[in-house]
Image (tube, rainbow, N blue to C red):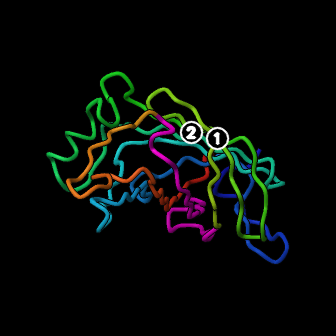
């Protein structure tokens, strides 16, 4: 049986791919972020600081799997009052729905480094299928002998589809918080021995 230190990456269609195996998401080198338009003039950005996840990378990328659990209460928009409001029933209802999950269902290669990753996203107890645009950013063996892989991913969801229906309207019309939420992910994961 080989150990992580003996495993090497592989080349597929001229692209360096990560070694086959199970990878844990490295939370200190991963950013799970979002952006939503505020008062129709700017975007507020935020992130989640507590999450864990696993990637099972297969010989054929289409057979790979991804799963992530996010602590909804770890939201950080750099404003304590706003973060407190997001945790209430107006938005995330953290008391009743402390975690969100994503579980992949299918992966389709668009190019050797770009993929469509479909999966089930659960927010506030509501599960909907979403599609992430994923890019393989690189593969590296770090100075400690660990094999690491990096991916970028993005998608857009309608928050109301997940029961996040806060609907405050401005005096001149239009929502204080837009329905469309852009999700951006910069992910680094480490091969487990």
The residue shown at (64%, 67%) is 135
Residue 30 circle label = none
Disc 1 to disc 2: CB gap under 8 Å: yes
Image location of residue 31, percent across then percent down: 42, 58
Residue 22 in the image: state x and y as whole percent.
Answer: 66, 45
Q: As rendered, which of 119 and 38 lies closer to the eye?
A: 38
Say if 35 sits above or below 192 in the image.
below
Q: Nearer the viewer, residue 149 or 155?
A: 155
Read off the magenta span. 136-162
Give x and y (percent) for residue 77: 26, 54
- Element under label 2? strand
Give the residue furthest to the left: 81
Q: CA distance from mark 1 to mark 2?
A: 6 Å
Q: Residue at x 61, y 52 (%)?
A: 191
> Is 122 rendered above or below residue 24?
above
Crowd class of label 2 (few under 14; some 14 to 19; many from 20; radius 10 Å):
many
Q: Secondary structure at mark 1?
A: strand
- 102 within the magenta span: no
Q: Which residue: 63% across, 47% down?
A: 55
- The residue most toward the top is 96
Residue 41 in which image quadrant: bottom left
Left or right placement of residue 65 versus residue 61 in this view: left
Report the quarter where the N terminus lies: top right
Sequence-earlier tag: 1 or 2:
2
Relative to 148, residue 89 above or below: above
Q: Residues within 10 Å of mark 1 (few under 14, many from 20)?
A: few
Is 137 colored magenta in this rendering?
yes
Q: Is residue 71 left or right of residue 60?
A: left
Picture coordinates of residue 121, whole percent (x, y) = 56, 39
Q: Which residue is disc 2 drawn over?
A: 121
* Image disc number at residue 129: 1
- What's the residue at 19%, 39% (across, down)? 84
């Amino acid at each position: 049986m080989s150990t992580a230190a003996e495993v090497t990456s592989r080349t597929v269609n001229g692209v360096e791919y990560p070694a086959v195996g199970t990878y844990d998401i490295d939370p200190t080198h991963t950013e799970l972020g979002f952006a939503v338009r505020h008062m129709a003039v700017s975007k507020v950005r935020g992130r989640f600081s507590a999450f864990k996840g696993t990637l099972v990378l297969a010989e054929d990328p289409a057979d790979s799997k991804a799963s992530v659990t996010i602590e909804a209460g770890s939201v950080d928009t750099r404003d304590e009052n706003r973060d407190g409001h997001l945790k209430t029933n107006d938005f995330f209802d953290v008391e009743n729905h402390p975690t969100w999950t994503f579980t992949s269902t299918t992966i389709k290669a668009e190019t050797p480094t770009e993929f469509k990753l479909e999966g089930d996203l659960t927010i506030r107890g509501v599960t909907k299928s979403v599609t992430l645009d994923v890019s393989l950013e690189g593969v590296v063996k770090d100075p400690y002998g660990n094999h690491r892989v990096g991916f970028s991913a993005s998608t857009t969801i309608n928050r109301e589809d997940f029961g996040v229906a806060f609907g405050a309207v401005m005096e001149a019309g239009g929502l204080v918080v837009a329905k469309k939420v852009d999700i951006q992910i910069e992910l680094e994961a480490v091969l487990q021995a």
